[in-house]
Image: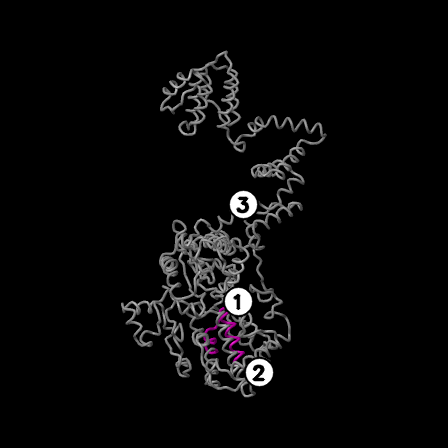
Amino acid sequence: MTQELTFPNSHLEFAKILKDNNNCISTTLSFFEQNFQMDFEERKQLEATLLRVRSRIRKAKKSLDCLEGDWWHCGISMEPELKRNRFYDTVELSSDEEEVISTLSASHRKSIDNLTMQQQRSRLSNVLESIKALSIVENTSEIKIAALALQLLSNQTKQREIAKVSKSVVYDKFSGQFGKLLKKELDVTKTVFLVDLLEIGRRKYTQLRHHLLSSDIRFPAYYRVVEERNSIILRSDIQMYPNPETPLGVYMPYAHHVRHTFCRLMSTLPPPTAQDYPLQFQIADGLDGSGSHTVYNQSNTNTDTKSFILFCFRAVKIISNSGRELWKNNTPNSPFAQRPIFLLAAKENEANIKRFMDDLINTDTDLMRSEGFTLGPDQQVRVDIVRSMLDGKMAGILSGAGGASCQLCTATHKELSDRELIIQGFPINRYITDAIQLFGEIEDSHSFFSLPSNQRCNITHEPTSTINILPASPLHSYTGIFRWFNLLIYHLNCGKRTWSPTSLTIKNSMIFVRNLIEGKTGMRIDQPNASGGTSSTGSVARRAFSCDSKYIECVLSVVETEHKETLSKLHTHLSAILRIINSDRIINTEVFGDLCTDTYLLIVDSLPWVSITPTLHRVLAHSEEILKEFNLGRGLKSFSEEGSEACNKLLRKYRENLARKSSFEDNAMDIFVRLASESDPVLNQFRSSLVCERCGEHGHTKRAKCCRDNTENRLLDSSIDEIVDSLIINS
């Protein structure tokens, strides 16, 4: 019986083991094979050691020549001096010993891909002879026999390596119909985009792949699609918050995600020159809550999944050091341009927002604004963050001025209707940095809130954002002014000259007016929808302030004659102002400011009993300064919160239809992964974008109402177009 071996520390001990085992080649070579990868790493030392071993046992010239041939097939050749020192014997090895030798040589075989063509031909000699003999029997070519064999292997075998090798061989060696068929396989990156676009999972994708295979169209396997998607979105960096044991959701580090997005964008652009650095990367961010979600009875979780909070950012543009625009987002308001940062199951309140912002956002925000990030030597990138993707409630929570009449100035509600102040202007004088400093001067928060509201600038709580916010959001400007305009119609219809939106008279008038508008135009206004929101959405508001004359005709038909001219003029001015704010054109800010002031005075002089809402005041009093000082006289289309609001629909759809329900962690992770994948800049290159042939803008075609070559629509909208054209300097 062979004794148990221990690995030697030197060749002398190795020889001793041979002697103790009666120079048995089977035992010795088995031991050698098991321990080769650990200690005998150098090929020269391996060859020398093996020859020394063979000098202590009986060996034959035939067996050594076979061993050398096996090694040559593997891409290994013996050193010349070792060949000269070989010791030959006339005794042949046993069958067991030859089997051990072949096993040992097989363990050191190189991959056939790494061999020379002569070595590959030698290793495949038996296969080639069989193919040649079969081609003679079948009276066909050898290439056709090999191609058919590879086709059968790739179609009927589950082994992925066989299909991969078959495809590569056909690409390089063969031509004809079979080679063309294999070359139809879709690129993996494009397949990831296609899977996201079709919103399908593994089962449907596999069925689609098998059906298309019968039509000579090949898709990559689903596991390759998953691997590519994980590498694109950096799946390993997505973490559970606050910990895997009691998760509230998932997140990705803010600064890391911004840097990754920038690198993905730069991979699609020509490399910048050394003079272009440092680059400026401008982004817009914000967060929004989404409620009325379906509650699933998921195991091992106590998380309330009825409400979610999504924080995301979008890339706006990349600017060189000289001010040259290297890249600009042409579809900033698309939901597929919003990059997610965190998705948490929580209600949209002050305590939750403060906790999430302090833990996940504020530190990275300050770091990126102060230092940016570095791509390489002398390749610095500065990050400009604009916190604009907010609604009114979220702006109040982040600024701490929830009780203020305006998030941009310190004016009181009574001062909003003061004619002299309107003429003088309302300068922007409310900043988060001042609020943080004011709040920090008084250590006791109880003493701070005991002060009169005017002394603490209407601050109701500590600001949760460390950078200034831009609450002049184009989308909510549309919806806010649309709701105010409808309330004005209700008051004028019933003859009530005091602003009381909740009175019974106003409610009865609202029912009458909205039924009339819905009957003549099909527009549903001020009605609840199925998800708990309102029917007065951004699209409805745009239609009301567009060239659609039916809405204003219905409005003028329900008010008294003395107010029709004022109401028509007010509608025209508000429509022009909102179009300018929601555009991306360069504006004549002085003329635009005069238009806003005239509209403000028109409301105060003609309708002195009307209440000025914060949204109306912000648009009419601060739009000129925001466009001039903040965005260099350009519209705010790139900083709209429309994209983040649209993500709420995707969130609801993905959660219910395209995410696992096995646990809350799996559900939240699937949603976040899909949101991150669909917003990837490289994948978005494959997404078709609507471009108007008339105006050149993205997002609509020449058949849209704003660009339709229709004389009737142009006449109806001529007054608004004249005002807008007079305000635009350059596109």
Q: Amino acid at mark 2?
A: Leu
Is residue 591 on the magenta stretch?
yes
Mark 1 element type: loop
Kindly indicate whether the residue at mark 1 contacts the one at mark 2 (C-beta within 8 angstroms).
no
Q: Nearer the viewer, residue 731 or 400?
A: 400
Q: Are marks 1 and 3 in contact (CB under 8 Å)?
A: no
Describe the element under mark 3 as helix, strand or loop: helix
Q: Residues within 10 Å of mark 3 (few under 14, many from 20)?
A: few
Q: Nearer the viewer, mark 1 or mark 3?
A: 1
Mark sitting earlier along the chain (2/1): 1
Task: Please say if 379 is above or below 289.
Answer: above
The numbered mark at residue 649 is none
Q: CA distance from mark 3 to mark 2?
A: 61 Å
> In this rendering, would 253 be left or right of 724?
left
Residue 624, horizontal then vertical, whole percent: 44, 73
Front position in the image: 508 or 397: 508
**Residue found farthest to the right:** 139
Whole-percent x, y for residue 580 in the image: 50, 72
Residue to which mark 1 is pinned? 531
Q: Position of residue 6 (x, y in %)?
A: 38, 24
Q: Which residue is mark 3?
A: 223
Question: Residue at label 2?
Answer: 556
Q: Which residues are magenta?
A: 569-595
Q: CA distance from mark 2 to mark 1?
A: 32 Å
